[in-house]
Amino acid sequence: MAGRGRISLEAIKKLTPKQREAARMVADGMSTKKIQEVLGISGSTLLAWRTRCHQFRTEVHQHQRTQFEDTATRTHALAHASVNCLARIIDDDETPPNVRVNACSVALAHQLRLLEHGLRVRQAEALEARLDELERRQSNIVETEAHSY
């Protein structure tokens, strides 16, 4: 640490193996208490990493993005198969009209959710970019203050 309550620029830029593991555990949704037990760290240490260490938060976000992308890939494959199944139901003249209408409703609802999801992803990316910029500015302030001591 550089001074009381300050994290050095080196600590901000490079995570220890324990910090990387803690970031993965946070991204996995593990409780603070469980992370403390597994890694043998205090709650205040984990809180400091989460609140004052930009690289730690970046590592958590990267793990979360990877998890989300993996889930999205699997869901997309399932959705593709489901849409094909719905198309067969809709196109089959022997399918009762009420079942065909329900299949159309499900297909349209799915499309709407995809559009809404795309909008939320773009909004989240814009917010993350803004957060990254603010955190970079904060790191520059911390670095400037560290050099002034």
Image (cartoon, rainbow, N blue to C red):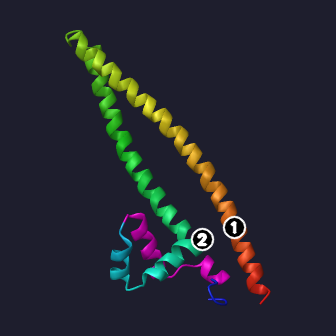
116 in magenta: no
Q: Is residue 24 left or right of residue 2?
A: left
Looking at the rendered structure, the kind of residue marked 1 is: Arg
Label located before the other in sequence (2 or 1) = 2
Looking at the rendered structure, the kind of residue marked 2 is: His
Residue 77 image offset from top left, x and y in percent: 35, 40
Callouts 2 and 1 close, C-beta under 8 Å: yes
Q: Which residue does the image show at 58% across and 79% down from the upper left? A: 14
Q: Main secondary structure of the magenta part?
A: helix
Q: Which residue does the image show at 34% across and 36% down from the upper left? A: 79
**Residue at the spot of label 1:** 136
Q: Is residue 125 left or right of residue 142?
A: left
Residue 81 image offset from top left, x and y in percent: 31, 33
Is 64 above or below relative to 10? above
Observer-nearest of 32 and 13: 32
Observer-nearest of 6 and 121: 6
Give, as a single range, the part of the protein colored magenta.
Answer: 8-29
Is 9 above or below relative to 137? below
Tag 2 secondary structure? helix
Is 28 above or below relative to 95? below
Observer-nearest of 68 and 123: 123
Disc assigned to residue 46: none
**Residue at the spot of label 2:** 54
